Amino acid sequence: MKILQLHLKLLIRTKWCWLFFPLFCFFSYGAIYDSMYNLSLSGYVTQTLIFFGAMFAYYNHIRKKKEVGEYVSVLPYFRTSQMWMILAESIYIVLLLLLMTGFVFVYGVYLGAEGWLLKEAMIYCFIYFWLPCFVSLSYGYIMGSGTPRKFHVLLIIGVGLLVGPVMRHFWYCILVVLCGTKIADKIIGAISIGQASICTTADSFYGFQIEQGRIYYLLFIIGCLWSIYFLKKRRRGWQSAVAIIVTALMAILYLNSGRYVIYDQMSEELSARENYDLYYYMEHESFYHAGNSVIEGIEGNVKLRKNLFFEGRLKLRSKENIKDTSFILYHDLEVKNIEGENVKGFEQKADSVRVYFDKEIQKDEVYFIKIKYEGYSSPYFYSNEKGCFLPGYFAWLPSEGEGSCFKVKGWALKLRNIVNENQNYDIKVDSRYPYYFKQGTLISNNHMKRYRENEVEVISPVKLDQDRRKKLIQMNRCISKGRIKEIILVPNEGGTNRIYSTVYGRTYFADSFFWLYRDTNLSKKYLKEEWEEAVQCAKEAP
Amino acid sequence: MCKGSTVIEIKNVTKDYKGVKALKDINLNLTCGIIGILGPNGAGKTTLFRCILGLETYKGQIHCPDTLIGYLPQDFSFFKGLTVRESLEYLSRLKNIRLKDNEALIEETGLQDIQKRKVGKLSGGMLRRLGICQALLGNPKVVILDEPTVGLDPESRMYIRNLLARISTDKIVLISSHIASDLDYLCDQVLILNKGHVSVFDTKDHLLDALRGKVYEVEVSPEDVGKREYVSLRRDTGHVIARVISEDALSDQCVDPTLEDAFFYYKEGKNV
């Protein structure tokens, strides 16, 4: 413990280590000032931490070599002291990160942010501040463990720029030119340890980009680096064994964590997200046939976690005498089981699910089928615990007919209008977050019913104001109550499915309503003209 | 305690550095006392120390009964951000001993008044004292001091010489130097290394006795200075006085031999 204490003293007395502290404060302050809810300067913080972690570890290793001769290596407790040294450096870094994260936390508490949101902000800090810093710290140790060379510092800066968010788009463009979008997506996704870009904001509607798989992946990288470090140091004992086992474990967990879909435009794998459906529908036949049955109602339980689970019952009415029927379900939602009185089997092919019956079902006969499926919806549509449109604009619930959810025209992807707005719904939502429903259809928290009201419901961790005239939704995803997000639902007289983007570059969807999305200060009183102008803008949005 | 008995046994030790033999078949039995190791630069002094410490791999065997060896490297330094006291605390922990039990040593080495001074602010002499102090922490039975007086002013050299003389009882102390006069004051035994070989290893008295009557101081003309190899040259009232070793009796003044003379005489492996 004494050695640990002495190493901590040594670090505290190292002046340049403190140079980074004001930088943290600046970035954290910037994050708060700009918009606390999305920690929008976090890309800069992460990049700073990536440089800091690597330089810190490298410098301390080099300093030890310069200032302490190798004679200490023959002393009985030398190896233990090495571990104390690394522990001291880790504690130092953790304390700095705690200070920084604590700054975010205290500010959030001061502003009266909700507990669950603070928790998410802390997890975000862990994934985007802590883990990248520890990755670069481990890398710095490896660089410092060899013979010091002049180019090492340049290499550290170069690698920092390669893996950090500052230059990510630059590398991405180069890779796209060199090897195409698909490979570029994979390479850039694999080497990036920070945000998708320096100007990435965590989507206040979708939430922060928190993915379990990402944690495993970063821990896997850290494990790999420590394994290399121990092997390089010729420590083939328990230290190497632990590092290798942890690395293998993280690799297994990462591979089993499954795919994640980010429903946020300025987020991970921007291009991959945008192109995901386009590539799919370019490769698969795009068509639509009217179905031989009408889906009159859907009831069941939706479990929203990283992906979507549905178990429920469909009420159908046949249009003619049938031996089979089909409905549309997005292809990444895998049907696990379909049961029913006369159901013989089923077949899922692309976006179509065909159900076969034992006996012929007569025209106008009402029949029920039980269905269970799970998976992901299109990256364009929210359908996990971060947010979900119900019943929605999209075939994550079975929709009538046979065919594909999208149609492709050249390089453009168009959503098919396949949602039957006259269906009845009785859906219970199981989510870790409190969900709010639009007033009037709310049965209780996380339980929604709707009977032919011809309007779209929103299920999301957003709270709807009771004042229906303003149709104000308070976006509780902002930590600061002083700067609140506002969404105004404006009747869409055209009544068609529309998609438009706001000036922030985010995509929003409107069905019966346009969504006017504003970043506004609630303390400000809007003039009537301003308000009307905003509503008009929303109506005229392309 | 260890007087008379062998404490370090070195058998057939050879060390290669990429084909260059730094040590060639060294065989030594080192016993209690202060052993001065003399040799020109590159003779293998530091390599021998490093082999004894286990910092180098080598062919042959070195048997050292005590695992705790005090070592002062030639270029001793420590974390510049730590104070003298903290550095000694740190090194005590590495040796698994308590610093409180070594307060007398701190006083002996003259560090008690500078304990709060940072290592980075120490003068060369003070730093060397700290190095000696850390080497002696835990009272090791084997102490290796590599060039402890090099680069120091005469006062510091004298202080360190006296310090070593005081503290080196009941220990085997290996001191290397290429300044023979420093060792002259301290050593019981002398080991002369040259080009990785042991030229001679004997007691200082034996070595000096063997040279008695062979060392002369002769007056040479300035023109003759470069014509012959001398042990040393000095100027005396306009004359150049050269120190020579001669098997034949010379008419000039015969003087008492010193360790420097012995080093000069034995470095090429002459028999005693």
Image (cartoon, coloured by chain):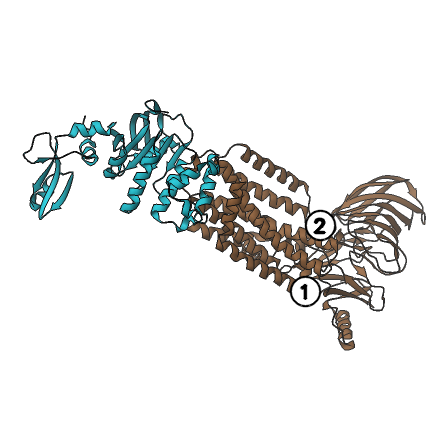
Chain colours: A brown, B cyan
Residue A258 in picture, x, y percent from top left: 69, 44
The residue tagged with tag 2: helix, strand or loop?
A: loop
The amino acid at mark 2 is: His
Q: Quadrant of the C terminus of chain A?
A: bottom right
Residue B80 in picture, x, y percent from top left: 43, 48
Distance Cα–Cα, label 1 vs label 2: 32 Å
Can I make out residue A182 in this image?
A: no
**Residue at 55 percent of width and 43 percent of height:** A87
> Which residue position holds label 2?
A284
The amino acid at mark 1 is: Tyr
Q: How many marks?
A: 2
Q: Earlier in the sequence, mark 1 or mark 2?
A: 2
Between B160 and A352, the one lying in front of the other is B160
In which quarter of the view is residue A23 placed? bottom right
B181 horizontally vs A311: left or right? left
Q: Residue furthest top?
A: B5
Q: Nearer the viewer, mark 1 or mark 2?
A: 1
Residue B142 in picture, x, y percent from top left: 37, 30
B33 horizontally vs A133: left or right? left
The residue tagged with tag 1: helix, strand or loop?
A: loop
**Residue at 40 percent of width and 25 percent of height:** B65
Between A65 and A271, the one lying in front of the other is A65
Between A435 and B200, the one lying in front of the other is B200
Q: Which chain contains the residue that carries disc 1? A: A
In which quarter of the view is residue A264 placed? bottom right
For the residue carrying disc 1, how many other residues have a C-alpha within 10 Å: few (<14), some (14-19), or many (20+)? few
In the image, residue A204 above or below residue B245: below
> Which residue position holds label 1?
A504
In the image, residue A446 above or below residue B256: below
B66 horizontally vs B27: left or right? right
A239 horizontally vs A304: left or right? left
**Residue at 69 percent of width and 62 percent of height:** A506
